[in-house]
Amino acid sequence: MPQLEQIHTFLGQIFWLVITFGFLYLVLWKAALPRVSSILLERQERIDEDIRKAEEFRKEADEAVAAYEKLIADARSDAQDLIRAANEKLAADAAARQDALTDKIKADVADAESRIHKARVEAIENIQSVSVEVAQAATSRLIETEVGAEDAQAAVTAAIQGRS
């Protein structure tokens, strides 16, 4: 195998490998690592700044939410006050209409009672006049005697007063 035939150059290769890696390590340590660490540091600072700004925005958002909730609560309170006032006004209007209707009904009832009383008086007078006529007719049929209107009226009046 050709790899094993180069064993006598193995020490030289290891020497140059250590020198190359050492040089590469020094270059990385002096040139690349400071750049990478400064980039990582800048990145960390940017992340910290973004987190700080996010905290500020969150606080502002919390304040905005609190203000919004306060506005909503105030609007609900105002709406409830308006509804309460409207209900009170409607109740007062309904009570006024109820009172007006009650007064009208009372007036109508009083008017109807007065008409009923008049009709009753007229009916009683009509009944008395009819009773007088019936009494005259019954008397003339039963005993075949004509009774005068005043006598029949007096008899009917006496009969009505006797029952009352």
Image (spheres, rainbow, N blue to C red):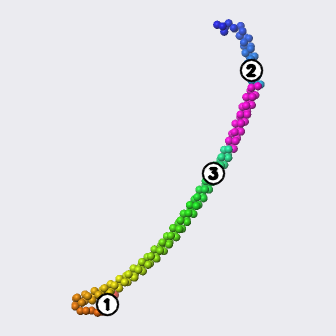
Residue that mark 3 sits on: 68
Residues in magenta, as a range = 31-56
Whole-angstrom CA distance, mark 3 to mark 2, is 62 Å
Q: Nearer the viewer, residue 8 or 113?
A: 113
Dot placed on the residue nearer the N-terminal end, 3 or 2: 2
Q: What label does residue 153 carry, if any?
A: 1
Left or right: 8 as drawn, with respect to 102: right
Residue 41 placement (x, y as % from top left)? 73, 33
Q: Secondary structure at mark 2?
A: helix
Left or right: 70 as drawn, with respect to 108: right
The type of residue carrying mark 2 is: Leu
The type of residue carrying mark 1 is: Gln
Query: Can the viewer see residue 162 in this picture?
Result: no
Quarter of the figure with the N terminus: top right
Figure check: 17 above or below 100: above
Dot placed on the residue nearer the N-terminal end, 3 or 1: 3
Residue 103 placement (x, y as % from top left)? 48, 74
